[in-house]
Image (tube, coloured by chain):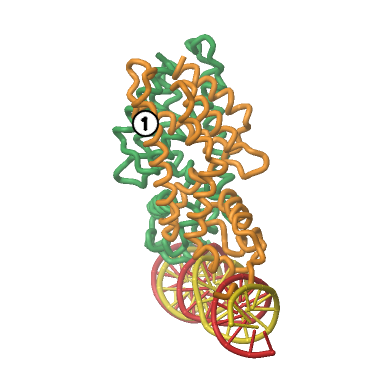
Chain colours: A green, B orange, C yellow, D red
Amino acid sequence: MPGGRPRAFDTDAALDRALEVFWRQGYEGASLSDLTAAMGINRPSIYAAFGNKEELFVKALERYVSGPGAFAAEALDAPTVREVVERLVHGAIELTTRTDAPVGCLMVNSVHACGPDAASARDAALACRMAGETALRRRFEDAPDLPDGYDAGTLAGLVHTITDGIAVQAAGGRTRDELRRVADLALRTLLP
Amino acid sequence: MPGGRPRAFDTDAALDRALEVFWRQGYEGASLSDLTAAMGINRPSIYAAFGNKEELFVKALERYVSGPGAFAAEALDAPTVREVVERLVHGAIELTTRTDAPVGCLMVNSVHACGPDAASARDAALACRMAGETALRRRFEDAPDLPDGYDAGTLAGLVHTITDGIAVQAAGGRTRDELRRVADLALRTLLP
DNA sequence: CCAATTGTGTATCGACCGGTATGAAACTAA
DNA sequence: TTAGTTTCATACCGGTCGATACACAATTGG
């Protein structure tokens, strides 16, 4: 079985470029011309290597989860409920206000890709979000230090709501320092 | 001064239809064909009555603020800080989980319209958001019942962050009842 | 060398985008 | 009626969208 002509680009590197374009411009706002320009490869190479635009987005989303968004899964390993929430909130702030990447959160942005042809991209992001929150709820359900009067699912929902809000605020231009003050107030009152 | 042919549609009613399309599909996702179909008028009538797509969006945004989003300005008239926050949060939940309108918040959706030609739409939404939060901060600055240790600007930022998060959660499919439980936990801990 | 296979570059596809030219239709003022 | 003005409906503009057809280049197995 012959090997054929070798690929002239690195798949993962190209995927990282695509991720950044999707992150900054959204699924609908990222045209194939933008993607090819950023990835440094031609249009047919994208289709040969990744399928179509939808599949490229899904692969970029996976890379986002296991790369810049990996802190969310790692935060669950923190020893206390308070520390889990703290790491999630602070991680969200750092993720969405980086200077070496687009502001905001790809996952939150993608929820608002409301065009008719962006449905599959939105569904993929929604599935990721749902999985993340379920894992967080499980973490709280098993926690012996969950404060009295706190429901695991409700707390997970509130933490997720706050991190979502942080992403919107970051996308709207709020600075990292401002968000830290907001987060400190939230943490101070929610889990004193 | 002659009168010319009278308009065959109601401007405000057509604007309401356009608002719903923008609300559901976003600025970029709403094509002129979608808009003409929903508004029941032809393309040139839109341009004659509203200008271009950008101006139509801005007018729809103003109608959103003074219509479905009017609760936000009215909430500032509540007598106590606690009640202002309560009305803002509960109003956000009701706004973003209506059954007779698209889920989510047009203002939050528009922040994530990241395409290059949606810049003016995003800027218009950002200006509205900024104005709203400034008014909220002023309300807290003048409040004699602002709890000790609470900074007016930080509290306004946190409330705004939470309402933003609510909009994202609603857009992601969370139900009104779930959001109410989340909001109750937030209010209970933030302003006991 | 010769197939067989796979990637690359160009050029293009039909569909749709936002926006408009054009002329008929419907009104007011005289 | 007639002139003037405004709106309506059709049909179309150049440009861009996502996706592909096609021919050529580069590699492996024989």
Q: Residue at x 52, y 59 (%)?
A: B56
Give the total of numbered labels: 1
Q: Is residue C5 above or below residue A126?
A: below
Residue B109 vs residue B145, the one in the foreground: B145
Q: Is residue B8 visible?
A: yes
Instruction: Give the vertical position of B48 relative to A109 (above or below).
Output: below
| Quadrant for the N terminus of chain B in the image | bottom right
Q: Residues within 10 Å of mark 1 (few under 14, many from 20)?
A: some
Q: Position of residue B137 (x, y in %)?
A: 37, 31
| Nearer to us in this view, A171 or A51 | A171
Q: Let me know if residue A136 appears in the view.
A: no
Left or right: where B84 falls relative to C14? left
Given the image, on which type of amino acid does mark 1 rest? Answer: Arg
Answer with the quarter of the image where residue A171 lies: top left
Nearest to the observer: residue B63 or residue A32: B63
Q: Position of residue A174 (x, y in %)?
A: 34, 39
Q: Position of residue A118 (x, y in %)?
A: 57, 53
| Relative vertical location of residue B121 with respect to residue B32 in this rendering, above or below | above
Q: Which residue is mark 1?
A: B137
| Residue name at image x 55 percent, y 19 percent | A152
> Element type at marker 1?
helix
Rendered location of residue A169, percent (x, y): 40, 38
Q: Give the chain of mark 1.
A: B
